[in-house]
Amino acid sequence: MSVQATARTPSRRWSRAAFREALGGYLFISPWVIGFIVFSIGPMLFSLYFSFTKYNIVSWPPEWVGLDNWTYALSGKDRLFYHSIVTTGKFAALVVPLGVLTSLALAVLLNRGIAGVTFFRMIFFLPSLTPIAAIAILWLWLLHPELGPINYAISLIGVKGPRWLSDQVWVIPSMAIIGIWASAGGSRMIIFLAGLQGVPQEMYDAASIDGAGPLQRLWHITLPMISPVIFFNTVLGVIGAFRVFALAFVATDGGPAFASWFYLLNLYQNMRDLRMGYASMLAWVFFLIVLVFTYVQFRMAVRWVYYAGETGK
């Protein structure tokens, strides 16, 4: 009997110690868990409920309307709904590929060990530290049709510059230029630079011995080796492009003639009009759009993203 009791004692001690250790771990993470439930999961569930209601904050309880908000938007009765999606898509189609390529080019340049590389890193990174409102005001002056220095420089070669942010045709390309300038030298460039520095130098040396030139080494070694980094930055770039709001809000307020009326501007306008039920529906549609685009990118990544630890099939 005593032998059995002795045999059970270590197990009991271990289980008590494991319980105390687990309890301590749960207590340490409980502030984050509580905060995540209260400030993330909770509001998401409430917004999902509000998306099926007519709610204006002032009156309570919200009026249940079922799928009316969803059908109103998806049926095209809200003329700005699909327009805002298309406008945001045009902006993303410009800013994502050009932004990724620009960040990659800057990272390749800095990775070559040129003189004054620390200075150039600082210069490239500074725009990403500037508040977006200040960036918008700066570029409003730079792109001013009559007083802006860019149009003045263009006029010196005998060409009349466009109206940029005041023109329905040029406003999206102008916003893309501003977005690329503000983000190309930021965290995306740093991530690319870290990926480039992780490529083994031996691979470049072997390729050089075989007679590969700089472009061949870039295409056959650098890009495949940093393809996971390219994929990561592309996913974040798409999400960031769809989230564009502050730049358009300060620079154009959706104009001219709704030409820069991005999706989040449409959502914000409905919130400002206290149409909280409809705005909640727009937020969930935005979540689904981003989810679908991210899923498609992950599915397509299997074809071109190379992970060094994977074995071929």
Image: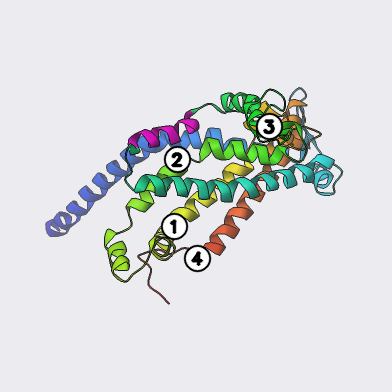
Q: How far apart, in angstroms, are the residues tagged by discs 4 and 2?
A: 23 Å
Q: CA distance from mark 4 to mark 1?
A: 9 Å
Q: Are marks 2 and 3 in contact (CB under 8 Å)?
A: no
Q: Position of residue 292 (x, y in %)?
A: 63, 55
Q: Which residue is mark 1?
A: 228
Between marks 1 and 3 in the image, the one whose residue lies nearer the viewer: 3
Considering depth in this image, is 160 or 210 the residue closer to the camera? 160
Question: Which element is circle 1 on?
Answer: helix
Which residue has dot 4 on it? 304
Q: Which mark is residue 155?
A: 3
The numbered mark, 4 or 1, whose residue comes first in the sequence reads 1
Q: Position of residue 66 (x, y in %)?
A: 80, 44
Residue type at mark 3 is Ser
- Of the residues tagged 3 and 4, which is closer to the observer? 3
Residue bearing the label numbered 2 = 187
Instruction: Report the front residue among 311 and 4.
Output: 311
| Residue at the bottom extreme of this rendering | 313
Using the numbered discs, state the Cα–Cα distance from disc 2 to disc 3 in whole angstroms. 35 Å
Crowd band around label 2 with a 10 angstrom C-alpha radius: few (<14), some (14–19), many (20+): some
In this rendering, is residue 50 above or below 224?
Answer: above
Per the image, is 127 magenta? yes
- Give the mark nearest the N terminus, 3 or 4: 3
What is the spatial separation of the Cα atoms under label 2 and label 1, in whole angstroms? 16 Å
Mark toward the start of the polypeptide (2 vs 3):
3
Task: Determine if the magenta segment contains residue 29.
Answer: no
Q: How far apart in space, not on screen, are marks 1 and 3 (Cα)?
A: 44 Å
Residue 176 appears left or right of 159: left
Asked which secondary structure carries label 4, the reply is helix
Marks 1 & 3, CB-CB < 8 Å contact: no
Magenta range is: 118-129
